[in-house]
Image (spheres, grey):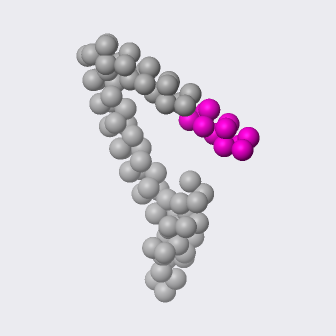
Amino acid sequence: MLLLFLALLPQFTDPTTGWPVAAQILLLGLVHLTSCAVVYTGVGTGARAVLRARPAAARIVSRVSGAVMITLGVALTVEQLI
């Protein structure tokens, strides 16, 4: 999140406007926070509705996501050891 503020938001500010740069970054950060909250709430609600309606799909998603997390963990461990 800090990387977003440091890398992306400053290029959308304009020091010549009537608003201070800090206020502009704060407003842009609030817009980003609000849009993320709306999108992630929608994704979560949709996923819950689909997975409740299809318990077999929920089991498959759980198993696949668990396998992916284990694979990523092993890959990161191996990368650190090499």
Residue at x 58% of width, y 66% of height: 6
Q: Residue at x 49, y 86 (%)?
A: 16
- Residue 56 visible in the current orientation: yes
Looking at this view, is 47 or 63 the one in front?
63
- Please state if 82 lies on the left or on the right of 4 as rendered: right
Is 29 located above or below residue 69 in the figure?
below
Which residue sits at x=49%, y=75%? 11
Q: Residue furthest top?
A: 55
Examine the rendered structure and indicate whether residue 54 appears above or below residue 72: above
Q: In the rendered picture of this protein, how many numbered marks are placed on residues?
A: 0
Q: Examine the structure image and report whether residue 64 is included in the region drawn in magenta.
A: no
In this rendered view, identify the residue nearer to me: 47 or 17.
47
Quarter-of-image position of residue 64? top left
Q: Is residue 59 left or right of residue 70?
A: left
Q: Quadrant of the C terminus?
A: top right
**What residue appears at the point 53 percent right and 60 percent down from the top-left corner?**
4
Secondary structure character of the magenta stretch overall = helix
> x, y (%) of residue 63?
44, 20
Relative vertical location of residue 17 with respect to residue 5 in this rendering, above or below: below
* Left or right of 81 on screen, residue 69: left
- What residue span does the magenta drawing correspond to? 72-82
Image-quadrant location for residue 3: bottom right
Q: Is residue 63 above or below residue 19?
A: above
Q: Quadrant of the N terminus?
A: bottom right
Closer to the camera in the image, 6 or 20:
6
Q: Position of residue 59 (x, y in %)?
A: 38, 15
Residue furthest out toward the bottom:
16
Name the spot of residue 39 as percent of width and height, x first.
35, 44
Task: Kindly tell me whether residue 23 is visible in this rendering.
Answer: no
